[in-house]
Image: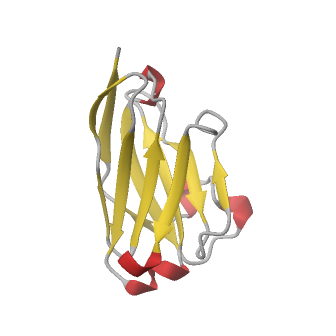
Amino acid sequence: VQLQASGGGPVQAGGSLRLSCAASERTFGRFVMAWFRQAPGKEREFVAAINFSGGATAYADSVKGRFTISKDTAKNTGYLQMNSLNLEDTAVYYCAADSTLIRSSWSMSSTYDYWGQGTLVTVSS
């Protein structure tokens, strides 16, 4: 599976962006999809994940209530709606997918087999 992340860019604090992650295969509907991010000088961290059907989600505490993950299996695309952005959200955002993950491993980057190239989000004051 090939993943293509897009939608990043500059945004002012308090603003919104929607990231997209387009998958190359229709079987994307059977994959867990997640977003991770990596800020300059920091390790990659979990942001959000959604199960194959879209019926279950998980979020990092730092984004809970501000970010929403979703997926459109008909379009083979996942999304991350980001609202109320703050300076700490500045990072390269990566989408990831895997077909075999159990929920307890959703937040672990090492367990995802497929990764997009990353899209940069820059939040300014």
Colouring of the image: secondary structure
Q: Residue at x 29, y 49 (%)?
A: 7
Q: Is residue 88 above or below residue 53?
A: above
Number of residue marks:
0
Q: Is residue 52 above or below residue 17?
A: below
Q: For this view, does 98 lie left or right of residue 87?
A: right
Give the residue furthest to the top. Answer: 125
Which one is nearer the viewer's eye here, 51 or 83?
Answer: 83
Residue 62, quarter of picture: top right
Q: For this view, does 79 lie left or right of residue 68?
A: left
Which one is nearer the viewer's eye here, 101 or 89?
Answer: 89
Q: Position of residue 22 (x, y in %)?
A: 33, 67
**On-image quarter of the C terminus:** top left
Q: Position of residue 77 (x, y in %)?
A: 39, 69
Q: Residue at x 65, y 59 (%)?
A: 57
Q: Position of residue 53 (x, y in %)?
A: 60, 76
Q: Residue at x 39, y 29 (%)?
A: 15
Which one is nearer the viewer's eye here, 19 or 92?
Answer: 19
**On-image quarter of the N terminus:** bottom left
Q: Is residue 57 above or below residue 60?
A: below
Residue 76, quarter of picture: bottom left
Q: Residue at x 32, y 72 (%)?
A: 2
Give the residue furthest to the right. Answer: 104
Q: For this view, does 53 lie left or right of residue 7?
A: right
Q: Position of residue 25 (x, y in %)?
A: 36, 83
